[in-house]
Amino acid sequence: MTEGKADHGLDSKARVVLLQPAFLGDAVLSSALLESWHRNFPDHELSIVVREAAAGVFQDHPFLSAVHTWNRSGWRKYPRLLRVAQTVRSSRPEVVVNLHRFSSMALLARRSGASCLTGFEGSLKWPSPKEKLVAHGIGDGRHETERNHAQVARFIGAWNPMLDRPVLHPSHEHRAAAQAWPSGGLVLAPASVWATKRWPQSHWAELADRWVQMHPGQAVILLGGKGDQALLKSIAEACRVVAPKVCAGDLNLLGAAALMAQSELVVSNDSAPLHMAGAVDTAVVAVFCSTTPRFGFGALPAMKSNGTAAEVEVPEGALDCKPCGLHGHNLCPKGHFRCGNDLEVDRVLAAMEQVSSPRG
């Protein structure tokens, strides 16, 4: 037995399924567990269940034998869930690791036939004896990668923030697609599913202009999906000093990751691009409006420690209504959105100057 690890009792060729059908950023963070598990058990057969929109980040993944997708839209998501459950069961897994905190994946785990189930407390009211549950603990000081790791620490040892990190694997084709865009510059990711996570458009435009005034000649790329095209174009049109390139769905998810990897710096809302930048080891500044990094979904601890990541939000205590929710809202509940409007460009610029890319 390796020092620091419990006697896991797993077969050397065990089949292991990870469940994480939450948002894209959550799927990216789950890749840390894939990396850790593969490092400890390189002969295990790994697969993952994610929502359809996140499947692209695991395309041609070197450690995964299968990527199972669940379309969560509409009432048909429940019949689809049963089909996914049957597919997982037919693979005859020995271990199912449930990183999702709600009952749907807990029920899938139970139907999997696996002899070992791990998950977070509260996903089901009456866990079975074979289910090993741990507390999740939003706001308990741990990063989400550490909370995920806690489920399986008895298998893969203590969490190490320098080693147990998310990693994405863009292929040669993804990198080639990204090379059609400027490299060595600034990537701005101003979109989010939630309106109260989006720093105001005027702030993004001012940020781009002032950064280029401070760093003449550096390219600026506005990055998002196809649905973000209007937002990105509006920000680009508001710029007065720089003419940013707009990349709105022109690259797939791993192509976007490759674009970040060839860039000097990424600035993102509290959204998936924050985690994607960390997963390709590019310096990143995270802008938090209605949410807070104290929830555990901020920049990676290792990157904050080595000075390649920073988080910016209005000063603590400035607003008694912040944070107003775990995910955000379509409208500010108070009607003023001061957590975004009052977050000054100067504060973000200062954080950008402090972080530096780890590449030589």
Image (spheres, rainbow, N blue to C red):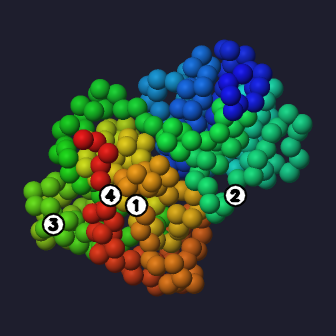
Amino acid of disc 2: Gly
If you read the primary sequence from the N terminus, does the residue marked by circle 1 or circle 3 appear first? 3
Q: Nearer the viewer, residue 139 or 62?
A: 139
Quadrant location of residue 342? bottom left
If you read the primary sequence from the N terminus, does the residue marked by circle 2 or circle 3 appear first? 2
Question: Which structural element holds mark 4?
Answer: loop
Foreground tag (4 vs 3): 4
Q: Which residue is mark 2?
A: 137
Neighbourhood count class around disc 1 (C-alpha, 10 Å): few under 14, some 14–19, many 20 upward: many
Q: Residue furthest left?
A: 217
- State the mark number for residue 82: none
In percent of the image, x 16 and y 54: which residue is there? 219
Q: Residue furthest front?
A: 3
Question: Which structural element holds mark 1?
Answer: strand
Cα distance in 3D space between marks 4 and 3: 15 Å
Q: Nearer the viewer, residue 173 or 195?
A: 173
Cα distance in 3D space between marks 1 and 4: 7 Å
Q: Which residue is mark 3?
A: 214
Are the residues tagged 1 and 4 within 8 Å (C-beta)?
yes
Q: Nearer the viewer, residue 310 or 336?
A: 310
In percent of the image, x 14 and y 55: which residue is there? 218
- In which quadrant is the N terminus drawn? top right
Horizontal arrangement in the rendering, residue 78 relative to residue 310 (left or right): right
If you read the primary sequence from the N terminus, does the residue marked by circle 1 or circle 4 appear first? 1
Query: Is any part of residue 198 visible from this angle?
Result: no
Quadrant location of residue 168? top left
Question: Percent x, y for residue 29?
Answer: 53, 45
Q: Which residue is mark 4?
A: 355
Amino acid of disc 1: Ala
